[in-house]
Image: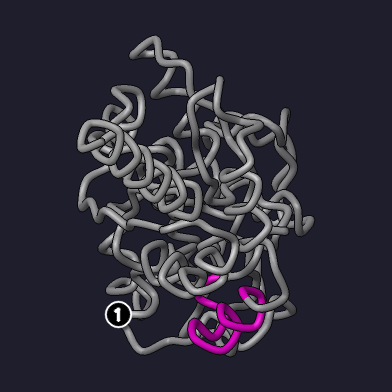
Amino acid sequence: MKKKFKTLLLTGINLILLSQLSFANTVLKVGATPVPHAEILQEIKPDLAKEGIDLKIIEFTDYVTPNLALADKDLDANFFQHVPYLEKFKKERNLKLSSAGNVHVEPLGLYSKKHKSLDELDKKDIIAIPNDPSNGGRALILLHDNGIITLADPHNLYATEFDIIKNPKKLRFKSLEAAQLPRVLNDVDFAVINTNFVIETGLSPEKDALLLEGKDSPYANIITVRDEDLNKPEIKKLMHALQSQKIKEFIKKKYHGAVVTAF
């Protein structure tokens, strides 16, 4: 009798445990850089909880570890990079990672302290641009897309001044370290500056940029996952929460043009 009771008791405990497991939330570990990525993820935590997903945000302050941690299965996804960076990184490291979708762009913009509109763009004006290959090409593409110059291949994300085939105003370009660009605004006619450095100067991308990248920029920040996980239900739910009207409104209200949605 005691043996039978013990068996029944153990069976009951196992059923309770199985029941609890069936109702337990799926843990989803996403690596992200603090601003704005982790802030955006924090905003959707309650929405994912309603979908049975416990979102764990692991913050990183470098651009190498999140992809390696994802490939090693220490993360389920990461949120810090754009496609050009991912493609280069995974090719160099032979990693099987893919984009699950766009979320936002931290737009590059054209600024000036000497001119209030592009109508004042004059012959032989000096435009300062970032000197790193990725952002330098990005700056030239922005100018191409707005008819200021013409590039041989506007899809070449690493374009340089040597790729300019039309420059009707004979504009001169000055390549500088990206962080220095806000400091030279008084010395040049225009400068193409990354949003994060613009914010530090007190300028507003929304109010002060004469040109600003839009949501179609190839530099949209993405959710990255392992190739085999692209169709996992929890990844689909993550993307649905991120590409929502709620996040559109959150980004617009919080970042005032320094971050724009890319969906």
**Element carrying mark 1:** helix
Q: For the point 30% across and 33% down, which residue is it?
A: 4
- Disc 1 crowd, CA 10 A, few/some/many (<14, 14-19, 20+): few
The location of residue 83, given as percent across then percent down, is: 55, 36
Q: For the point 22% across and 45% down, which residue is it?
A: 62
The location of residue 195, given as percent across then percent down, is: 44, 69
Residue 179 belongs to magenta span: no
Question: Can you name the residue that lies furthest to the top here?
Answer: 94
Q: Specify whether residue 110 is in view.
A: no
**Could you tell me the amino acid type at mark 1?**
Glu
Q: Is residue 179 left or right of residue 260?
A: left
Position above or below: 111 against 137 = below
Q: For the point 43% across and 40% down, which residue is it?
A: 77
Q: Is residue 121 left or right of residue 109?
A: right
Q: Nearer the viewer, residue 244 or 121?
A: 244
In which quadrant of the rendered image does the C terminus lie? bottom right
Position above or below: 242 against 15 = below
Magenta region = 247-259
Residue under pointer 1: 200
Q: Nearer the viewer, residue 139 or 247?
A: 247
